[in-house]
Image (cartoon, grey):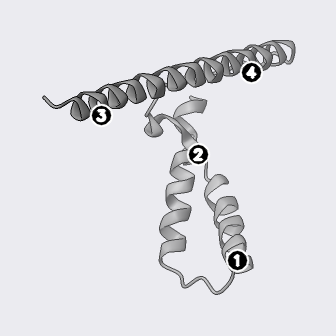
Amino acid sequence: MPKSEQIHIQKHVSLEEFNKKIRSERDERILKRLYFVKYRYEKKAKKCDIELVYLPVYSPHLNPIEYIWKSIKRTISKNFIKSQNHMKRLIRVNFLKYASRISFAKSWIE
């Protein structure tokens, strides 16, 4: 293997290792922040006698708001959006319409 190729491979590996280290440090900072925020909200919820429910990751079928957003997206996709204000109005009207239906949260209430 020529020397220039060896140097190129070494730089490539070093760059990968560098990126890996940066990602792990960034992920660690993010996790620390998330734990801090979670602790603060748990503390506030406890004071207000609110029970927090943690949903499994990637479980939109368990989160009632996801059904509302899905319905809003379906409604908006059928309309021609004339302006940003028109879109905001469509979202607002449909959000209130779908959120008022108890069926979205019925399984949570029972």
Mark 2 or 4: in front is: 4
Mark 3 or 2: in front is: 3
Q: Distance from label 3 to label 2 (Cα)?
A: 50 Å
32, above or below 8, in the image: above
What numbered label is drawn on residue 37?
4
Q: Distance from label 1 to label 4 (Cα)?
A: 33 Å
Q: Residue at x 58, y 40 (%)?
A: 105
Q: Distance from label 2 to label 1 (Cα)?
A: 23 Å
What numbered label is drawn on residue 54?
none
Q: Check disc 1 and report the residue beneath it.
A: 84
What numbered label is drawn on residue 8?
3
**Sequence-first tag of 3 and 4:** 3
Q: Percent from the top left, x then y, of residue 13?
A: 33, 25
Q: Distance from label 3 to label 1 (Cα)?
A: 50 Å
Give, as a three-letter code, the residue at label 4: Val
Q: Check disc 2 and report the residue beneath it.
A: 65
